Amino acid sequence: MHFMKKYYLVAPGPTPVPYDVLLEGAKEVLHHRTPQFINLMEETMEGTKYLFQTSGQVYAFVSSGTGAMEAAVENLLSPGDRVIVVVAGKFGERWLDILKAFGMKPITLELEWGEAVSPEQIKDALEKNPDVKAVFTTHSETSTGTVIDLEGIAKVVKEAGTVLVTDAVSSLLAEPLKMDEWGVDVVVSGSQKGVMLPPGLGFIAVGSEKAWKLIEESKSPKYYFDLKAYRGKYPENPYTPAVNMVYMLKKSVEMIKEETIEKVWERHAFLGEATRRAVKSLGLELLSKRPGNVVTAVKLPPSIDGNKLTKIMRDKYGVTIAGGQAHLKGKIIRIAHLGYLSPFDTLAVFSSLELALKELGYKFELGASLKTLQEYFSENT
């Protein structure tokens, strides 16, 4: 039987975009040097502070989140600086690669994929290396579905008088993150995850004078991502901004403020818990030892090829989830609960997952995950 295919995007970025936000992108393009656009930019970026829970300045680059990660390294540090970097997955590795590319001397805290670094481990590394300029962490390691205790880590780093930089590309809005209250100095993120926009904007929020002091002292080569240029021009941009993405960002911020950030965090926690329960009801295991509410990484039995599984779900049933990265390719799947998703999207994911698992010969009770989800939703809504 042939059916019309409806597409479900349930990967940890890009994520679905609300229709009201998409429509903002269809507005007429303003010239970026006009007072009309500069006023729009200022209003939007002031609103964006709410997403980071900071009174510090937030800047937007025309880039992905990786551009914002690069900006953090080249603006805060000088070649030869010693820093601590946590590597417990693909995106911790990305911090390490960028630090090396700019000639830094990283001290690597390496953990098994799926493990979460603890505040005690950070404290120990800082005591052994009191001369480090900064600590680089990944709030949500998207490759493993693991979320760290950022609040606890921020306390330890603050006590040591060091600067804490965190990659919140996937965690922003999906997990509680309170920059000012916790004392997180620098946070980077991207538009295509919890902010519910298409890819195209990289964000960096600078929340402390301690961080600005490092920025003033930095001798790394920089041009496009030079934060001093952005600070000097604000609210105007030193270079051409993504005009229509700014319209969309403004709308997204308005929607998030209307819902409230607490309810956004609650919504992600609700779908995260539902997903974990549904996974276990199929006799499958979680990869992460400290799973978060961004994405759930699921171990597959050796008999199931994860690449085939995601292909069947995408090409036959129209449901796009993520597979594993690096050495976990084909061995895990990753189901997101990030951004503009509802309980019915989660039901669609598990319907297609069950059909694909059945096709690949996995033994389980058909409908088990759907029953688990429906029971959880009916009890908690």
Image (spheres, rainbow, N blue to C red):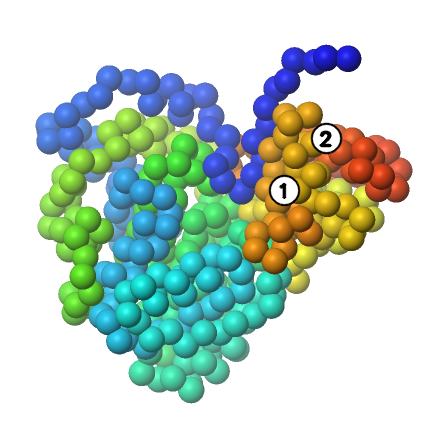
Residue drawn at point x = 24 percent, y = 29 percent: 243
Q: Which residue is mark 2?
A: 352
- Ranked by sequence position, the earlier of labels 2 and 1 is 1
The residue at 65%/58% (across/down) is 288
Residue 19 located left or right of residue 32 = right
- Tell me which residue sits at (68%, 57%) in the image: 287
Under mark 1, the amino acid is Ile
Residue indicated by mark 1: 335
Give coordinates of residue 54: x percent, y percent: 33, 52
Amino acid beneath label 2: Ser
- In three-dimensional space, the C-alpha distance between marks 2 and 1, rounded to whole angstroms, equals 12 Å
Location of the C terminus (image quadrant): top right
Q: Position of residue 283 (x, y in %)?
A: 82, 48
Q: Nearer the viewer, residue 318 or 279?
A: 318
- Residue 332 picture location, percent across and down: 67, 50
Where residue 343 sits, quadrant-wise, is: top right
Instruction: Give the residue at the far bottom of this rendering.
Output: 128
Labels 2 & 1 near each other (Cβ < 8 A): no
Q: Pointer 2: residues within 10 angstroms few (<14), some, or many (20+)?
A: many
